[in-house]
């Protein structure tokens, strides 16, 4: 795996004025990372959970699909 594409853990306060801007940027970098992974049986939700902080997980932890998780 190319370390250049590996995203940092996303950790932003949902109450921050900058959180939406930070999320949009981080999500693009995360999706670039996903695209570089073998796509076979890739579970995007499980990968996403590994790259978010516990506080962010609280917001997305019950999502059943990747699409549901990223819009929460």
Image (cartoon, helix red, strand yellow):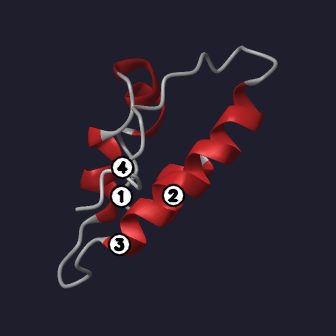
Kindly identify the residue that appears in the image at 58 percent across and 43 percent down: 26
Cα–Cα span, label 4 and label 1: 24 Å
**Disc 3 and disc 1 in contact, CB within 8 angstroms:** no
Q: Residue under label 3, please give it.
A: 36
> Of discs 4 and 2, which sits in the foreground?
4
Kindly identify the residue that appears in the image at 71 percent across and 14 percent down: 15
Q: Quadrant of residue 36?
A: bottom left
User: In front: 7, or 2?
Assistant: 2
Quadrant housing the C terminus: top right
Kindly identify the residue that appears in the image at 44 percent across and 39 percent down: 60
**Disc 2 and disc 3 in contact, CB within 8 angstroms:** no
Q: Residue under label 2, please give it.
A: 68
Residue placed farthest to the right in the image? 17
Which dot marks residue 6? 4
> Of discs 3 and 1, which sits in the foreground?
3
Q: Position of residue 40 (x, y in %)?
A: 19, 85
Q: Is residue 49 left or right of residue 13?
A: left
Q: Dot 2 surroundings within 10 Å: few (below 14), some, or many (20 or more)?
A: few
Q: Residue under label 1, please give it.
A: 64
Q: Position of residue 58 (x, y in %)?
A: 41, 26
Cα–Cα span, label 3 and label 1: 23 Å
């Amino acid at each position: 795996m190319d370390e250049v594409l590996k995203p940092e853990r996303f950790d932003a306060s949902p109450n921050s004025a900058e959180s939406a801007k930070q999320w949009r940027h981080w999500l693009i970098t995360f999706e670039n990372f996903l695209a570089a992974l073998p796509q076979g049986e890739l579970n995007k939700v499980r990968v996403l959970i590994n790259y978010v902080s516990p506080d962010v997980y609280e917001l997305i932890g019950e999502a059943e699909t990747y699409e549901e998780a990223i819009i929460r």
